[in-house]
Image (cartoon, rainbow, N blue to C red):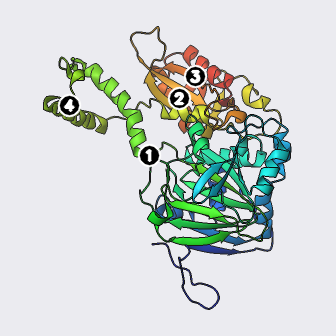
Amino acid sequence: MPKKVKPAGDGKEEGPVPCKQVKVEAAGGPSPLNLDSPSGLFESLISPIKTETFFKEFWEQKPLLIQRDDPVLATYYRSLFRLSDLKSLCSRGMYYGRDVNVCRCVNGKKKVLNKDGKVHFLQLRKDFDQKRATIQFHQPQRFKDELWRIQEKLECYFGSLVGSNVYITPAGSQGLPPHYDDVEVRGEETARLREDELLPARVFILQLEGEKHWRLYHPTVPLAREYSLEAEDRIGRPAHEFTLKPGDLLYFPRGTIHQADTPSGLAHSTHVTISTYQSSSWGDFLLDTVSGLVFDTAKADVELRAGIPRQLLLQVETTAVATRKLSGFLRMLADRLEGTKELLSADMKKDFAMNRLPPYYLGDGVELSTPGGQLPGLDSTVRLQFRDHVVLTVGPDQDPSDETREKMVYIYHSLKNRRETHMMGNEETESHGLRFPLSHIDALKQIWNSSAISVKDLKLTTDEEKQSLVLSLWTECLIQVV
């Protein structure tokens, strides 16, 4: 159970109690987020809660509410996204469904008020003022630099995609009925998420403008993997109820049923949901790696290469013989897994690298796509750069002309990713990176695990191989000469 906080006023405990709550008094000086490093950002985001405490007591377990009386931080949060930003954004060519949803909760049900085609600010503002509609803006990090900066750092911190949505709700109105969410916004899922108006689940909510009244309910499905609307007569009384103000933060785990409204008589509310850990469960990881494990094991075990029984695919139910056979194979795979050092990632690493944000930078970004500095040679000392934006994995050769399907080393990176398509699942993305023979794996690990290394010391047979490796990495802007 979340820790109870003694109520203010007459001391009577009526109705739901707040979730774990931390009050932060304003310090004498400014208290912006620490954007120097991924870990520094997350520590400042949940301050004064310690990172170790957060992951031990709250992550995937229970809500956390941090209320701050900090005018400097509140001003900074307001700068992330304002209602007034919509006018300039609409002039850049926003479209209903893709970029913006307009909706309102009426009699416990969501009513979508989207028009067709392009969003015009005057019509959007009319629906907001006259119909009391909530405006949801999808993936604002595509256009707002500071959100790009925050989310790029969080993707490095979590090692998972980080999406966001902005919700702007007029006073005395509510956009969505009670619901819980499955997972966080991600590439190919985004179209469905926009349609369902999902508030992604492992989510951090930052209150930017005005106030928002929240009610959280106990999950009906812990760590749910599917989105669901829930009738109020089924979910009972709120377990936690509170109001967020600018500078406040709320976290709750996946599956937490929730609803929120803007109190009457006040200004509009703007909050941003920053969400992560889509398709990042142990089950997802198992599905991703087991295919490579089967591929390796089948090369060494003739039983896995033998054909299945005749007409097995025509059976309505799986036969006992097939079940016993599969059980035996799974035990064999488990035994093999115990001694495996190189897990073959089929998709997860590549998918993360392809769909994440590029590194945050100021300027035109030419430095991220064009190599610079000294050309590496055999006598050079080199070091890896953009470490948090590069993944290394081993997998079967993806060249369709190679029938042997030998293992290769793949390096994927996000340096050339397009910020404008981040988390927009209907937008085409492409992978950027390199592939090398498996014989290069030890040399690559040397570069990955060293702060700097001499090219001569790389574990490759010939000097030509060493020079070719570092030149390829330098051309992709992945290493620099020191």
In the rendered structure, which disc, 3 or 1, sits on the residue that comes first in sequence?
A: 1
Say if mark 3 contacts mark 4, CB within 8 Å: no
Most distant residue in the front direction: 107
- Left or right: residue 374 compared with residue 355: right
Cα separation between marks 3 and 4: 42 Å
| Residue denoted by label 1 | 281
- Left or right: residue 149 compared with residue 326: right
**Residue type at the position of mark 1:** Ser
| Label 4: which secondary element | loop
| Label 2: which secondary element | helix
| Label 3: which secondary element | strand
In the rendered structure, which disc, 3 or 4, sits on the residue that comes first in sequence?
A: 4
| Residue denoted by label 2 | 444
Q: Which of marks 3 and 4 is in front?
A: 4
**Residue type at the position of mark 3:** Leu
Cα separation between marks 3 and 2: 12 Å
Cα separation between marks 2 and 4: 45 Å
Specify whether residue 452 is in view. Answer: no
Counting other residues with Cα less than 10 Å from the Cα at mark 3, is it few (<14), some (14-19), or many (20 or more)? Answer: some
**Residue type at the position of mark 2:** Leu
Q: Quadrant of the C terminus?
A: top right
**Residue type at the position of mark 4:** Thr
> 448 or 454, which lies in front?
448
| Residue denoted by label 3 | 434
Image spot of residue 319 (x, y percent)? 16, 30
